[in-house]
Image: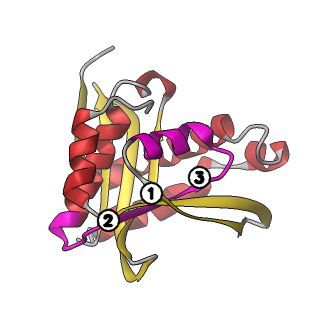
């Protein structure tokens, strides 16, 4: 595979980010969420949201992309939480990788970039929510020292699901874990 480079996302990345998110949901949640819901997801529905986020250039929000030449192969985003949740002041709001970029450290690097950006904005910890049946993602967070905080029901687009919240209360320790471990993402 080509060398992966990492950078802050720009508004020009919105369509590729939206497409990767939809493709990832269709692959990851097949058998977990209704087929009709997954098949009905449209990239166009989230391009506008990602364009708006990336054009706003708000310091409390950070979005990073992983690129293989000109192809987006992963992205991650985070934001400060006001007020904090579970006594944690920042959240990893998304992290998605194309299959070709999985299990090679791309996810760890993206997570570390978000953690560093949140720390630079004054955050001390990071929270992430994952659909409870997403075992590979849960394993990834657990291997990096994420503490299981809560498992609870939630509703997404009219679907009743279970979510699991993981948290890190020490961002430098999370960055170190991302640099030193070889987890599955």
Mark 2 element type: loop
Circle 1 packing at 10 Å, graded few (<14), some (14-19), many (20+), is: some
Q: Earlier in the sequence, mark 3 or mark 1?
A: 3
Return the residue at label 2. 169
The residue positioned 30% from the left and 33% from the top of the image is 181
Label 1 secondary element: strand
Quadrant of res 153 = bottom right
* Mark 2 closeness class: few <14, some 14–19, many ≥20 residues within 10 Å: some
Quarter of image, res 6: top left
Residues at marks 2 and 1 touching, judged by CB atoms closer than 8 Å: yes
Residue 8, horizontal then vertical, whole percent: 24, 50
Q: Residue sitting at 38 percent across and 48 percent down?
A: 145
| Of the image marks 2 and 1, the number of the one nearer the N terminus | 1
Residue 68: within the magenta? no
For marks 3 and 1, give the one nearer the viewer.
1
Specify how the rendered protein is coloured.
Answer: secondary structure
Q: Which mark is residue 70?
A: none
Left or right position of 146 against 29 = left
Give the spatial CA distance, label 3 vs label 2: 36 Å
Q: In the rendered structure, are the residues bearing label 3 and label 2 in contact, judged by CB atoms less than 8 Å apart?
A: no
* Residue at the spot of label 3: 44
Q: Residue at x 42, y 51 (%)?
A: 14
- Tell me where the magenta segment starts and ends, as one range: 119-143
What is the quadrant of residue 103 in the picture? top left
Q: Which residue is mark 1?
A: 147
Between 122 and 66, the residue placed more toward the observer is: 122
């Amino acid at each position: 595979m080509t060398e992966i480079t990492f950078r802050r996302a720009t508004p020009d990345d919105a369509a590729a980010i939206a497409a990767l998110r939809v493709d990832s949901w269709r692959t990851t949640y097949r058998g977990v969420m209704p087929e009709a819901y997954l098949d009905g997801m449209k990239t166009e529905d989230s391009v506008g949201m990602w364009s708006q986020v990336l054009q706003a250039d708000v310091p409390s929000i950070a979005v990073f992309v992983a690129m293989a030449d000109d192809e987006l192969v992963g992205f991650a985003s985070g934001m400060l939480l006001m007020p904090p949740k579970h006594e944690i002041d920042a959240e990893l709001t998304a992290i998605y990788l194309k299959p070709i970029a999985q299990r090679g450290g791309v996810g760890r690097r993206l997570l570390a970039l978000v953690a560093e950006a949140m720390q630079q904005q004054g955050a001390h910890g990071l929270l992430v929510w994952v659909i409870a049946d997403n075992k590979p993602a849960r394993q990834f967070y657990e291997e990096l020292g994420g503490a299981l905080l809560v498992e609870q029901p939630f509703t997404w687009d009219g679907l009743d699901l279970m979510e699991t919240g993981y948290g890190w209360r020490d961002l430098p320790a999370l960055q170190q874990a991302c640099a030193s471990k070889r987890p599955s993402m």
